[in-house]
């Protein structure tokens, strides 16, 4: 081992003194910093994230696949135009009739989402007579209670907020893509311009100002319902939805992510 | 950022067969060939270290000639391990955050600490204790730049008396013992990064860390065989057939375990047949046919198993030069097989949609950030570093005499503990 | 020990302020994300000036449709009334009302190729009072 013991003990004393000096100033500065935050960190107009719990619910039976929500989301959040960058999108499911005498309940399930459904869907993919059932499903961040994306972020750049949104901090994200791999719902993408992960923020800049998220605002049929579970207002749409759709489901429940986005009238083929 | 700017991105429509979530249908998979290289390189680090610790911890004397070589190989590859990761990050300049605010629930946050531990507390320390006496000797005998380098590496400790040397040997052994679990940790955690992703049925699997560890051991040993044979050839010195036979034996056993665990993985998947099995079967038979069934299973596992197994059974009947060839071909096949295994895991997991309804295409580019040129360069770099290490720290006269590599350490060191 | 001290020192200087106030993230990120400007103004903003239109709309079938569903982003117009809103075209109607087997049956749908071709929708229908005309 290192022989000169005198040198080592000197080193130890020195580093001990250094550490002592540092911890003193650290604690002092940390305290000051904390105080500064407590005073300064309040979101616009006194919004307190701990006093809200937002929820999104989807009524599949009311979605008409117009694509206004996808377009509004891209505009509102400056999501890159392109076929693989979506914070929300619409999927079309077409379940065909089984062949006569096949003994099956249903035929094939065909799913498509051309450009996220932003410009609508091409007609005539399957002739009308062959369709057993067809419907649109809007998709967005599932606001998981146990979000796998926030769990795997190595630096804490994506997180569950106290008010129920799952956000990405674009100034802190290192762009490793782990969260995108961990999301079972394909709700995240790598923004090609900022090189950071991006996802539905529940229009955090809107909901903190008392507005509805852009997709909910423009939805013409109220297929998307949005509300605050902690502050119910009279005739609150989210409470009406929960009351009316007691059997509302979530996507991929077997993964244990406990999504908070509810889907009413969901078909088993949707995943 | 405004929309007029974002409108300018030109997108090539990616090809999708069936349905994929729109965000998944990217032109390149998010984790591309750089992330294939990363677990391959760390696997080689861990495997080569296990090879070295066979000598130190388990006293396998026949492997003496490759002890230092495998440690240096391990170090050369470890120095290159973070590069593919850094190059792949969207914001490499923020990489320090992973050390400053490590999110403890993320397996990736471990990287900085595991890496620093392995580099500073295991490999460098073990090498230093092992080389210390030589550094002292060389710093006296060599002049010029080399002498300066050796003198710097002694870190000012010039004592080579008997008790101090014995202490060196004991420290080396302790570090080796600590190093084995560290090597398992280093690579097991890489496997865990994939194994912990429940969203992806191709990755999310408890066996994944174990598969990674054993394939790492196999690939690292194969690398040592390859480097040792190549070095002997380059120095026109005969490789010790004793050493090669022993390496072949360990390689064979490790390969048997590796193959058994990987088959167990497949048997379990096929038998339990959950909702993902249809897409995984068509993945294996379609897009991964050449790399998985032909590359990994047949040429990477079955052929080396037969070759090395034949040597185990009929060692006496196979001539020395034939055995040389078998070891060489076997190790090259294993190295290629493990590389294709990494490819199958990393790229394969991103070729099908998490909706389990379709496949994405992947075309490998030549140049550019995600091209294979960069990856080949990253795989070549450790060999260059290793070349420098060998030039500096493995003088030809010593490593190839049939007597133990260093006159001082092995006999006294190993028995003293 | 030196390494650990160095690490702690670096950590002290490189950890952003406000980290860990609510959880393992920069708490100020919430403010930063919330500070983004809006482009859709919301129904309330429309109601401030066009309340009679909003109230009339609420009596008819299109009551669930918000102003900005058809008229487009309104924040610019709300900030400066001189800024024009999007001009509407025929495609806005068929975007929702084109016949499509995937659309729910309660929605009124037409085949635009067979339904009074060559005429504009507004020649017969009033978008704000859709039930008025057949």
Image (tube, coloured by chain):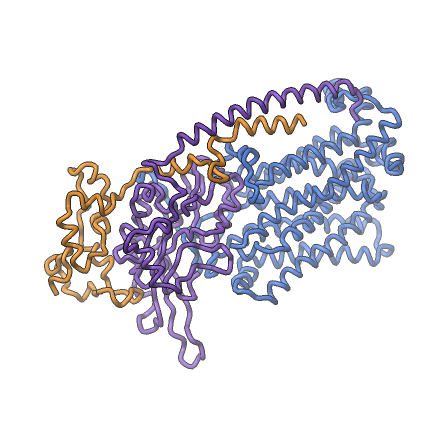
Chain colours: A purple, B blue, C orange
> Where the N terminus of chain B falls, by quadrant?
top left
Vertical comparison of B144 with B359: above or below = above
Residue A17 vs residue A218, the one in the foreground? A17
The location of residue B335, given as percent across then percent down, is: 67, 48
Residue B337 shows up from this direction = no
Point out residue C126 in the picture as x, y percentages from the top left corner.
12, 57
Residue B134 pos. (x, y %)? 81, 27
Query: Quarter of the image holding residue B19?
Result: bottom left
Q: Is residue C112 above or below residue A202?
A: below
Residue B394 visible in this rendered orientation of the protein? yes
> Does residue A67 lie above or below A105 as drawn?
above
Q: Quadrant of the C terminus of chain B?
A: top right
Instruction: Kindly indicate the quadrant of the structure image that contains residue B305.
Output: bottom right
In the picture provided, is C2 more to the left or to the right than A87? right
Name the residue nearer the viewer: B352 or A29.
A29
Image side of residue A72 versus residue A52, left or right: left
Q: Residue at x 70, y 41 (%)?
A: B182
- In the displayed structure image, the side of residue B294 where residue B27 appears, left or right: left
Q: Position of residue B39 (x, y in %)?
A: 61, 45
Q: Is residue B279 left or right of residue A143?
A: right
């Amino acid at each position: 081992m290192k022989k000169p013991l005198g040198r080592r003990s000197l080193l130890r004393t020195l580093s001990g003194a250094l550490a002592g000096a540092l911890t003193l100033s650290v604690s002092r500065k940390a305290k000051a910093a904390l105080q500064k935050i407590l005073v300064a960190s309040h979101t616009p107009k006194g919004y307190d994230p701990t006093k809200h719990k937002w929820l999104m619910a989807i009524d599949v039976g009311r979605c008409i696949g117009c694509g206004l929500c996808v377009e509004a989301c891209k505009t509102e959040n400056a999501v890159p135009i392109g076929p693989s960058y979506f914070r929300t999108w619409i999927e079309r499911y077409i379940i065909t009739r089984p062949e006569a005498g096949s003994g099956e309940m249903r035929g094939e399930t065909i799913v498509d989402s051309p450009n996220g459904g932003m410009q609508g869907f091409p007609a005539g993919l399957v002739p009308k007579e062959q369709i057993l059932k067809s419907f649109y499903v809007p998709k967005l961040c599932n606001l998981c209670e146990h979000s796998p994306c926030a769990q795997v972020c190595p630096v804490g750049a994506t997180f569950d907020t106290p008010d129920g949104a799952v956000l990405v901090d674009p100034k802190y994200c290192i762009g490793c893509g782990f969260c995108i791999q961990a999301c079972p719902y394909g709700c995240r993408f790598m923004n090609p311009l900022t090189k950071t992960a991006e996802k539905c923020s529940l229009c955090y800049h809107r909901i903190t100002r008392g507005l509805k998220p852009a997709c909910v605002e423009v939805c013409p049929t109220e297929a998307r319902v949005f509300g605050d579970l902690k502050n119910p207002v009279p005739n609150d749409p989210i409470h009406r939805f929960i009351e009316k759709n007691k059997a509302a489901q979530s996507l991929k429940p077997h993964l244990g992510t406990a999504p908070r986005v509810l889907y009413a009238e969901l078909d088993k083929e949707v995943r | 950022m405004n929309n007029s700017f974002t409108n300018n991105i030109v997108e090539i429509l990616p090809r999708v067969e069936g349905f994929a979530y729109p965000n998944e249908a990217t032109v390149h998979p998010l984790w591309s060939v750089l992330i294939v290289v990363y677990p391959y390189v760390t696997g080689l680090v861990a495997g080569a270290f296990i090879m070295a610790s066979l000598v130190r911890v388990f006293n396998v004397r026949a492997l003496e000639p490759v002890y230092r070589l495998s440690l240096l190989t391990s170090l050369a590859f470890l120095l290159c391990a973070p590069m593919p990761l850094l190059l792949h990050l969207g914001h490499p300049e923020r990489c320090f955050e992973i050390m400053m605010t490590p999110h403890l629930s993320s397996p990736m946050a471990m990287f900085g600490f595991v890496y620093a531990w392995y580099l500073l507390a295991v490999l460098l320390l073990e090498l230093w204790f092992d080389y210390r006496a030589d550094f002292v000797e060389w710093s006296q005998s060599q002049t010029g730049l080399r002498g300066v380098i050796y003198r710097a590496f002694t870190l000012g400790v010039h004592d080579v008396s008997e008790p101090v040397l014995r202490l060196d040997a004991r420290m080396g052994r302790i570090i080796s013992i600590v190093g084995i679990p560290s090597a398992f940790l280093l690579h097991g955690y890489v496997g865990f990064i994939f194994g912990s992703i429940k969203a992806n049925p191709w990755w999310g699997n408890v066996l994944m860390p174990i598969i990674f560890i054993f394939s790492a051991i196999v690939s690292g040993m194969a690398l040592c065989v390859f480097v040792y044979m190549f070095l002997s050839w380059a120095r026109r010195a005969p490789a010790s057939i004793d050493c090669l036979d022993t390496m072949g034996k360990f390689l064979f056993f490790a390969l048997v375990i590796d193959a058994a665990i990987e088959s167990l993985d497949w048997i379990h998947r096929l038998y339990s047949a959950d909702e993902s099995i249809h897409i995984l079967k068509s993945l294996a038979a379609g897009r991964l046919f050449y790399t998985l069934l032909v590359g990994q299973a047949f040429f990477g596992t079955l052929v080396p198993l037969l070759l090395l197994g034949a040597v185990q059974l009929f060692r006496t009947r196979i001539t020395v030069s034939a055995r040389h060839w078998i070891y060489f071909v076997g190790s090259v096949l294993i190295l290629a097989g493990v590389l294709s295994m990494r490819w199958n895991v990393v790229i394969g997991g991103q070729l099908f949609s998490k909706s389990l309804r379709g496949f994405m295409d992947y075309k490998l580019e030549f140049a550019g950030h995600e091209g294979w040129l960069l990856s080949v360069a990253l795989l070549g770099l450790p060999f260059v570093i290793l070349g420098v290490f060998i030039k500096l720290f493995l003088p030809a006269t010593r490593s190839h005499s049939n007597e133990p590599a260093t006159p001082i350490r092995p006999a006294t060191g190993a028995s003293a503990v | 020990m030196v390494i650990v001290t160095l690490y702690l020192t670096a950590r002290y200087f490189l950890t952003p302020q406000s980290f860990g106030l609510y959880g393992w993230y920069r708490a100020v990120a919430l403010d930063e994300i919330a500070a983004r400007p809006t482009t859709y103004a919301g129904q309330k903003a429309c109601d401030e000036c066009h309340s009679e239109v909003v109230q009339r709309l609420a009596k008819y079938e299109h009551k669930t449709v918000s102003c900005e569903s058809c008229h487009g982003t309104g924040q610019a117009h709300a900030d400066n009334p001189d800024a024009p809103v999007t001009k509407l075209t025929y495609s806005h109607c068929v975007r929702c009302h084109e016949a499509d087997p995937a659309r729910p049956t309660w929605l009124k749908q037409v085949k635009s190729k067979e339904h009074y071709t060559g005429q504009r929708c507004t020649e017969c229908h009033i978008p704000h009072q859709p039930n008025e005309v057949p």
